[in-house]
Amino acid sequence: MDQTQSQKMKLDPMVAIGNGRRQEGVQMYEFGLMVFEGTRNGGV
């Protein structure tokens, strides 16, 4: 159990960065969709 715990701690920063990047990408994608919808409907 101790070994897996230490391995988890070692990987954690990379996992956090990966999750952060993914979250950022999702937000950018949703924002893009929102803007696209707005321009298509004649609004901004």
Image (cartoon, rainbow, N blue to C red):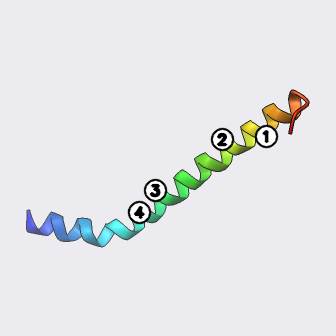
Task: Determine the secondary structure under disc 4.
Answer: helix
Q: CA distance from mark 4 to mark 1?
A: 28 Å
Q: Quadrant of residue 10?
A: bottom left
Can you tell which of label 4 and label 2 is closer to the viewer?
2
Can you tell which of label 2 and label 3 is closer to the viewer?
2
Q: CA distance from mark 4 to mark 3?
A: 5 Å
In the image, what residue occupies the spot 23% across and 68% down?
A: 7
* Residue 24 position within the rendered picture, expressed as x and y whole percent measured from the top left: 58, 55
Outermost residue, front side: 43
In the image, what residue occupies the spot 16% across and 64% down?
A: 4
Report the residue marked by disc 4.
16
Eyeballing the image, is 25 above or below 39? below
Task: Determine the secondary structure under disc 3.
Answer: helix
Can you tell which of label 1 and label 3 is closer to the viewer?
1
Report the residue marked by disc 1.
35
Do tag 4 and tag 3 residues touch (Cβ < 8 Å)? yes
Q: Nearer the viewer, residue 9 or 32?
A: 32
Eyeballing the image, is 37 above or below 16? above
Eyeballing the image, is 8 above or below 22? below
* Three-letter amino acid code of the residue under disc 1: Val
* Residue 22 position within the rendered picture, expressed as x and y whole percent measured from the top left: 53, 53
* Three-letter amino acid code of the residue under disc 4: Ala
Task: Determine the secondary structure under disc 2.
Answer: helix
Disc marking residue 30: 2
Disc marking residue 20: none
Report the residue marked by disc 3.
19
Among the two numbered marks 2 and 3 on one chain, the one whose residue lies closer to the N terminus: 3
In the image, what residue occupies the spot 74% across and 43% down?
A: 32
| Lateral position of residue 21 relative to residue 33, left or right | left
